[in-house]
Image: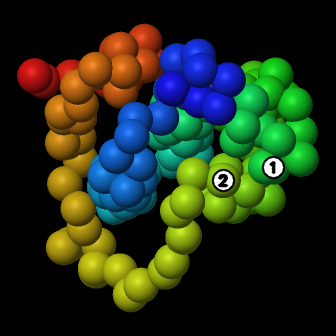
Protein backbone atom coordinates (compact mmCIF):
# COMPACT_ATOMS: atom_id res chain seq x y z
CA UNK A 1 0.00 0.00 0.00
CA UNK A 2 1.12 3.52 -0.68
CA UNK A 3 0.82 6.60 1.52
CA UNK A 4 -2.83 7.14 0.52
CA UNK A 5 -3.78 3.63 1.61
CA UNK A 6 -4.33 2.35 -1.92
CA UNK A 7 -2.61 -0.64 -3.41
CA UNK A 8 0.36 0.31 -5.60
CA UNK A 9 0.12 -0.10 -9.35
CA UNK A 10 3.82 -0.11 -10.14
CA UNK A 11 4.83 -2.89 -12.58
CA UNK A 12 8.15 -3.28 -10.76
CA UNK A 13 8.16 -6.15 -8.25
CA UNK A 14 9.26 -5.57 -4.67
CA UNK A 15 12.52 -7.40 -5.33
CA UNK A 16 13.85 -4.71 -7.65
CA UNK A 17 17.48 -5.76 -7.16
CA UNK A 18 16.71 -9.21 -8.56
CA UNK A 19 14.86 -7.68 -11.49
CA UNK A 20 17.70 -5.29 -12.35
CA UNK A 21 20.17 -8.18 -12.15
CA UNK A 22 17.97 -10.25 -14.52
CA UNK A 23 17.68 -7.33 -16.94
CA UNK A 24 21.46 -6.86 -16.91
CA UNK A 25 22.03 -10.55 -17.62
CA UNK A 26 19.45 -10.53 -20.41
CA UNK A 27 20.95 -7.46 -22.10
CA UNK A 28 24.47 -8.85 -21.67
CA UNK A 29 23.45 -12.15 -23.30
CA UNK A 30 21.93 -10.21 -26.22
CA UNK A 31 25.10 -8.16 -26.68
CA UNK A 32 27.23 -11.31 -26.75
CA UNK A 33 25.30 -12.96 -29.58
CA UNK A 34 27.21 -13.24 -32.84
CA UNK A 35 24.27 -11.79 -34.78
CA UNK A 36 23.63 -9.01 -32.27
CA UNK A 37 22.11 -6.03 -34.05
CA UNK A 38 20.35 -2.78 -33.30
CA UNK A 39 16.89 -4.32 -33.61
CA UNK A 40 17.67 -7.07 -31.09
CA UNK A 41 19.09 -4.64 -28.55
CA UNK A 42 16.18 -2.25 -29.09
CA UNK A 43 13.65 -5.07 -28.52
CA UNK A 44 15.42 -6.08 -25.32
CA UNK A 45 15.38 -2.46 -24.10
CA UNK A 46 11.71 -2.13 -25.08
CA UNK A 47 10.84 -5.26 -23.10
CA UNK A 48 12.71 -4.01 -20.04
CA UNK A 49 11.27 -0.49 -20.35
CA UNK A 50 7.74 -1.86 -20.42
CA UNK A 51 8.47 -3.98 -17.40
CA UNK A 52 9.97 -1.04 -15.49
CA UNK A 53 7.28 1.42 -16.64
CA UNK A 54 7.56 3.06 -20.05
CA UNK A 55 6.51 6.53 -18.88
CA UNK A 56 9.01 6.43 -16.00
CA UNK A 57 11.86 5.43 -18.33
CA UNK A 58 10.83 8.01 -20.95
CA UNK A 59 10.76 10.79 -18.35
CA UNK A 60 14.29 9.83 -17.23
CA UNK A 61 15.39 10.05 -20.89
CA UNK A 62 13.78 13.47 -21.34
CA UNK A 63 11.18 12.38 -23.90
CA UNK A 64 7.59 11.22 -23.98
CA UNK A 65 6.73 7.53 -23.90
CA UNK A 66 5.41 7.46 -27.49
CA UNK A 67 8.71 8.78 -28.86
CA UNK A 68 10.69 6.30 -26.78
CA UNK A 69 8.48 3.40 -27.83
CA UNK A 70 8.86 4.36 -31.52
CA UNK A 71 12.65 4.42 -31.21
CA UNK A 72 12.73 1.06 -29.44
CA UNK A 73 10.25 -0.67 -31.75
CA UNK A 74 12.13 0.44 -34.88
CA UNK A 75 9.55 2.92 -36.16
CA UNK A 76 12.03 5.78 -35.58
CA UNK A 77 15.80 5.84 -35.65
CA UNK A 78 17.32 4.67 -32.37
CA UNK A 79 20.07 6.95 -31.12
CA UNK A 80 22.93 5.94 -28.87
CA UNK A 81 21.89 8.74 -26.53
CA UNK A 82 18.56 6.93 -26.08
CA UNK A 83 20.31 3.59 -25.47
CA UNK A 84 22.41 5.20 -22.74
CA UNK A 85 19.41 7.00 -21.25
CA UNK A 86 17.27 3.87 -21.13
CA UNK A 87 20.13 1.86 -19.65
CA UNK A 88 20.63 4.42 -16.90
CA UNK A 89 16.89 4.68 -16.22
CA UNK A 90 16.78 0.91 -15.78
CA UNK A 91 19.72 0.98 -13.38
CA UNK A 92 22.08 -0.65 -15.87
CA UNK A 93 25.58 0.40 -16.85
CA UNK A 94 27.04 -0.42 -20.24
CA UNK A 95 30.67 -1.50 -20.33
CA UNK A 96 33.18 -2.75 -22.86
CA UNK A 97 35.60 -5.62 -22.75
CA UNK A 98 37.96 -7.34 -25.14
CA UNK A 99 35.93 -9.60 -27.41
CA UNK A 100 36.62 -13.09 -28.66
CA UNK A 101 38.21 -13.70 -32.04
CA UNK A 102 35.67 -14.35 -34.81
CA UNK A 103 36.29 -18.10 -34.60
CA UNK A 104 35.51 -18.06 -30.87
CA UNK A 105 32.50 -15.74 -31.12
CA UNK A 106 29.31 -16.45 -29.24
CA UNK A 107 26.87 -18.95 -30.77
CA UNK A 108 24.10 -17.73 -33.06
CA UNK A 109 21.32 -19.45 -31.13
CA UNK A 110 19.41 -17.46 -28.53
CA UNK A 111 19.31 -18.72 -25.00
CA UNK A 112 15.58 -18.83 -24.18
CA UNK A 113 14.29 -16.28 -21.72
CA UNK A 114 12.86 -17.95 -18.60
CA UNK A 115 10.77 -15.28 -16.95
CA UNK A 116 7.69 -15.57 -14.80
CA UNK A 117 4.67 -13.39 -14.23
CA UNK A 118 4.71 -9.94 -15.79
CA UNK A 119 8.05 -10.45 -17.54
CA UNK A 120 6.65 -13.58 -19.19
CA UNK A 121 3.59 -11.77 -20.57
CA UNK A 122 5.64 -8.84 -21.88
CA UNK A 123 8.25 -11.18 -23.38
CA UNK A 124 5.62 -13.22 -25.24
CA UNK A 125 4.07 -10.04 -26.61
CA UNK A 126 7.44 -9.13 -28.16
CA UNK A 127 8.08 -12.57 -29.64
CA UNK A 128 10.62 -13.96 -27.16
CA UNK A 129 10.69 -17.69 -26.51
CA UNK A 130 9.49 -18.25 -22.96
CA UNK A 131 10.04 -21.47 -21.03
CA UNK A 132 8.40 -21.95 -17.67
| For residue 15, side relative to residue 60 (left or right) | left
Where residue 89 is drawn, which disc sits there? 2
Query: Residue 22: where, in percent of width, then height?
Result: 31, 50
User: Is 117 drawn above or below residue 87 in the view shown?
Assistant: above
Query: Residue 7: where, in percent of width, then height?
Result: 52, 18
Asked if the residues shown at circle 1 and circle 2 are in contact, with their CB atoms under 8 angstroms apart, the answer is yes
User: Is 51 drawn above or below residue 40 in the view shown?
Assistant: above
Q: Local crowd at mark 1 within 10 Å, few (<14), some, or many (≥20)?
A: many
Quadrant location of the C terminus in the rendered image: top left
Can residue 12 be seen at all in this image of the molecule?
A: yes
Q: Secondary structure at mark 1?
A: helix
> What is the CA distance from the residue labelled 1 to the residue labelled 2?
7 Å
Q: Secondary structure at mark 2?
A: helix
Where residue 84 is drawn, which disc sits there? none
Q: Nearer the viewer, residue 105 or 63?
A: 63
**How are the residues colored?**
rainbow
Can residue 26 be seen at all in this image of the molecule?
A: no
Query: Residue 10: where, in percent of width, then height?
Result: 55, 27
Where residue 61 is drawn, which disc sits there? 1
Q: Local crowd at mark 2 within 10 Å, few (<14), some, or many (≥20)?
A: some
* Residue furthest out toward the left: 132
| For residue 30, side relative to residue 2 (left or right) | left
Query: Residue 85: where, in percent of width, then height?
Result: 73, 56
Taking the spot 23% from the left edge, 40% from the top edge, the residue there is: 110
Amino acid sequence: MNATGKAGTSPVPARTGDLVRQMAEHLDSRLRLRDCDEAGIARALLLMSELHGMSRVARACGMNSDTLRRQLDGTRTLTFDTVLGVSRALGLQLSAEVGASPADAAPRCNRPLRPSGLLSRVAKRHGYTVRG
